[in-house]
Image (spheres, helix red, strand yellow):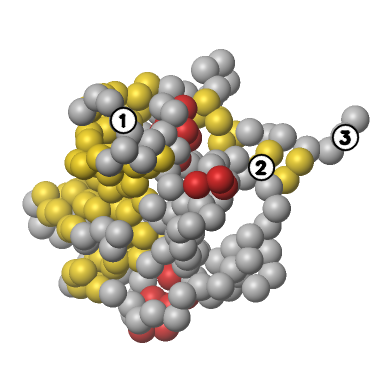
Amino acid sequence: MSSPSLIPDFDYFPPDTPLQFLHEDAQILVLDKPAGLLTVPGKLANREDCLITRLQAARWDALTVHRLDCDTSGVIIFARTKQAQGHLGQEFELRRAQKTYVARVHGRIDGDSGHIDLSVGSDWDYRPRQKVDLEKGRPAQTDWQVIDRTDTETRVRLTPHTGRSHQLRVHMLALGHPIIGDQIYAPETSRDYPRLMLHAETLSLHHPATKDRVTFAAPAPF
């Protein structure tokens, strides 16, 4: 029996850019993560340089709450106390945290909006890929809304209602409109683009200290 296939490992050249703070207080740190930078250290060699390592060099008390894919840019939040970390973790686990993304996808989407309800699971033969798996996958839902379109591509706003690994990338591929620049799911669309065209635009949740709902935003750089 042959062993499972692996997607060839990518060359990691993290961008040499300063930290971009969107908000900072005694409980939380909110940053605009650049594309091409891991959120946490990778398992392989030469993957130590990442956002949390850089952040802790500047703010020693920073604690990880959630992650963005290496190639995805945008709003990401960190805690500064264990209590805040626990509160924010519950916001994500109980789906009280709401996120929106902006993406440029291949092809012209005809409709103006829609809802994708397709379970997502690991594609064990081609790790780290995920795939639509209606039998063994975990439930995953995404809303999409067209912002703009041309004859060859569409700009959409994506609102995930679940947080499955690679959910937005898998769902848009299943819709027939893969995200441009995706070297894993649509390498043919990435030749002329320097990055994955996916950006975490907004994050809304309850602040761990005040319990008020707060929203943080960063415009897409593409």
Image depth: mark 1 or mark 2 in front = 1
Whole-percent x and y of residue 33? 35, 65
Q: Amino acid at mark 3?
A: Ser
Residue corresponding to mark 2: 127
Whole-percent x and y of residue 145? 22, 34
Question: The N terminus lies in which quarter of the figure?
Answer: top right
Q: Is residue 211 left or right of residue 164?
A: left
Q: Callout 3: few (<14), some (14-19), or many (20+) C-alpha neighbours within 10 Å?
A: few
Q: Secondary structure at mark 3?
A: loop
Query: Quadrant location of residue 152?
Result: top left
CA gap between label 2 and label 3 equals 14 Å
Q: Tell me if residue 135 can be seen.
A: yes
Q: Amino acid at mark 2?
A: Arg
CA gap between label 1 and label 3 equals 39 Å
Query: Residue drawn at (20%, 41%), measured in percent from left and top?
Result: 147
Q: Callout 2: few (<14), some (14-19), or many (20+) C-alpha neighbours within 10 Å?
A: some
Query: Residue drawn at (29%, 67%), measured in percent from left and top?
Result: 31
Residue corresponding to mark 3: 2
State the mark number for residue 109.
Answer: 1
Q: Amino acid at mark 1?
A: Ile
Q: Tell me if residue 71 can be seen.
A: no
In this rendering, the answer to whether 95 lies above or below 222 is above
- Return the disc, 1 or 3, that comes first in the chain's sequence: 3
Image depth: mark 1 or mark 3 in front = 1
Q: Secondary structure at mark 2?
A: strand
